[in-house]
Amino acid sequence: MARKYYPKPGTPIGSSGSVEYESRLPVGRVVCVVKIGSPEWDQWITVNKAFAYMVGDLFYSVKSFDRRRGNGYWSAYKGMNNQIVKIYIGTSDKLTVQRLEEIGRDFKRMIDSKQIQFRNDGLVKRPKRIKED
């Protein structure tokens, strides 16, 4: 049976249209929720450059990166031991609930269609390519 992969403790986690994160205040830690697509979301993603998103029981990472033309470009990553699969999202305005859910379904489809295979020990293996002579 394949191992389950979870984000690191303290990583903001999103699902069902919102992201939960811990905020450290002088009085202690407070769990905050920001709704994806809200004005608070736009402000939150300018400060926070990474979070995990959950679709069903599948987690994946969403990270921001900069380009010469500017910053605020996003990609989704699903890491499985020594393999990392990347799906480009686009600029911050493309970071919507619908797109995040679609990416989760894409990762699930890749796993289900054997493009990415789990072995019994939890490692990932890709299907062998057949060489044509």
Image: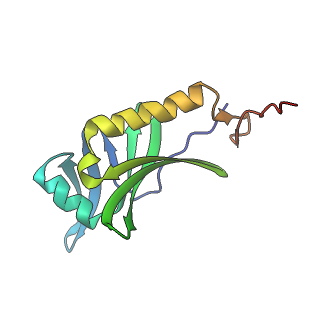
* Residue ranking furthest to the front: 133
Seen in the picture, residue 6 relative to 65 is either above or below; the reply is: above
Residue 45 lies left or right of residue 121; in this view the side is left
* Snapshot quadrant of residue 73: bottom left
Q: Where is residue 18 shown, x and y percent of the image? A: 24, 43
Q: Which residue is drawn at 28% across and 34% down?
A: 98
- Total count of labels: 0
Q: Which residue is drawn at 14% across and 55% down?
A: 40
* Residue ranking furthest to the left: 39
Residue 111 lies left or right of residue 65; in this view the side is right
Evaluate whether residue 30 shows in this view.
no
Residue 65 lies left or right of residue 34; in this view the side is right
Seen in the picture, residue 130 relative to 38 is either above or below; the reply is: above
* Residue ranking furthest to the bottom: 26
Q: Quadrant of the C terminus?
A: top right
Residue 11 lies left or right of residue 45; in this view the side is right
Seen in the picture, residue 64 relative to 68 is either above or below; the reply is: above
Q: In which quarter of the image is the N terminus?
A: top right
Q: Where is residue 36 shown, x and y percent of the image? A: 21, 45
Q: Which residue is drawn at 27% across and 46% down?
A: 94
* Snapshot quadrant of residue 32: bottom left
Evaluate whether residue 12 shows in this view.
yes
Q: Where is residue 24 shown, x and y percent of the image? A: 26, 68
Using the image as rendered, state which of residue 118 and residue 4 is in the foreground: 118
Q: Residue at x 29, y 55 (%)?
A: 21
Q: Where is residue 25 shown, x and y percent of the image? A: 21, 70
Seen in the picture, residue 99 relative to 28 is either above or below; the reply is: above
* Residue ranking furthest to the right: 133
Q: According to the image, what is the colour scheme of the structure?
A: rainbow
